[in-house]
Image (cartoon, rainbow, N blue to C red):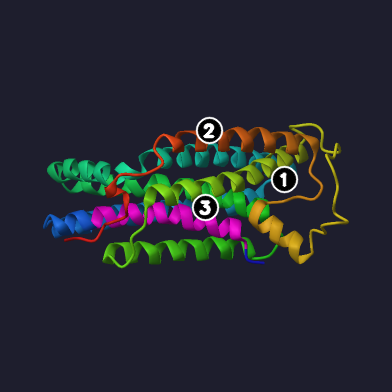
Amino acid sequence: MFSFGNYLIGLREGLEASLVVCILIAYLVKTGRRDALVPVWAGIGVAVALALGFGCALTFGSQELTFQAQEALGGSLSIIAVGLVTWMVFWMRRTARHLKAELHGKLDSALRMGTAALVATAFLAVGREGLETALFVWASVRASGDGSHGPLIGVVLGLLTAVVLGWLFYKGAVRINLAKFFTWTGAMLVVVAAGVLAYGVHDLQEAEFVGGLRDKAFDISGTIPPDSWYGTLLKGVFNFQPDPTVVQVVVWLLYLVPTLVFFFAPARAAAEPPAGAEAAVRPR
């Protein structure tokens, strides 16, 4: 079944990368430096290839491991992915309004340094997003996967939507308040991350790195069967599990509640972004 949670990941992460690309390309066109487009696209291409290679390595490399090693690796990488995406969500919440100016400054420096610097600037700007996306998508697909292609389809559709929106931003057909967009999608992503974290802990319990595998907090499988349409829906959106362990529930709560509290706390101090916060990346 289509996974909204994974669609959200693909949309949110893909849109960040799309906006970065749009800002870089639009600035070069606007300043009459079309000659610099080739090295910038080269850097972007290398970054995308690296992210895809990293995702393939995670997917196919882990298949050669024993069950216990797979669970240990999956649980550990899920926790790392949650840590990275949490940092990214808070970072973007704080810097979304200044992203354009920051990228322009880096690009100006790279233009003065030459072709290699342009390739490196584009690679670093997109590569970090790509590696984070590959890791978190892998962890989320693994957490919400049921043997079907639904989770992966959700990610791909999210990425495609992000590419289309990025193109529309560049053409000036769509404008969006980035501060508000990244605030609310960031909050939803925290909820998804909480489910990935709980699943990662369960993996570590399966690998016997963490105890309490048989200590169930509750079991409502009879009320919400995992194979029912609403059970599948809850799993696809929230990574819901009808029979979690006590440790999973505790970890889920300890992550979700304080993270959302801290995430929304500064929003009151700067609830309204300045006038230039909209995504306006069309070259003039």
Which stretch appears magenta?
3-25
The x and y percentages for residue 255 are 63, 35
Question: Does dot 1 land on a helix, a strand or a loop?
Answer: loop
Nearer the observer, 115 or 194: 194
Provide the major secondary structure of the magenta segment: helix
- Residue type indicated by callout 1: Thr
Q: In the picture, residue 1 is in which quadrant?
A: bottom right
Q: Residue at x 80, y 39 (%)?
A: 245
Q: Is residue 72 magenta?
A: no
For the residues bearing labels 3 and 2, Cβ distance under 8 angstroms: no
Count how many numbered circles sit on residues in the image: 3
Which of the two labelled residues, at mark 3 and mark 2, occupies the earlier sequence position?
A: 3
- Is residue 90 in view? yes
Q: Which residue is mark 2?
A: 262
Q: Which residue is mark 3?
A: 55
- Is residue 69 in view? no
Is 104 left or right of 123, judged from the image as shown? left
Which of the two labelled residues, at mark 1 and mark 3, occupies the earlier sequence position?
A: 3
- Residue type indicated by callout 3: Gly
Is 27 left or right of 245, judged from the image as shown? left
Answer few, some or many: residues within 10 Å of disc 2's Cα (few below 14, many 20 plus, some between 14 and 19): few
Nearer the observer, 214 or 272: 272
Question: Is 212 located above or below residue 32 in the figure?
Answer: above
Question: Is 173 located above or below residue 34 in the figure?
Answer: below
Residue 66's disc is 1
Nearer the observer, 63 or 104: 104
Quarter of the figure with the C terminus: bottom left
Q: Residue at x 61, y 38 (%)?
A: 79
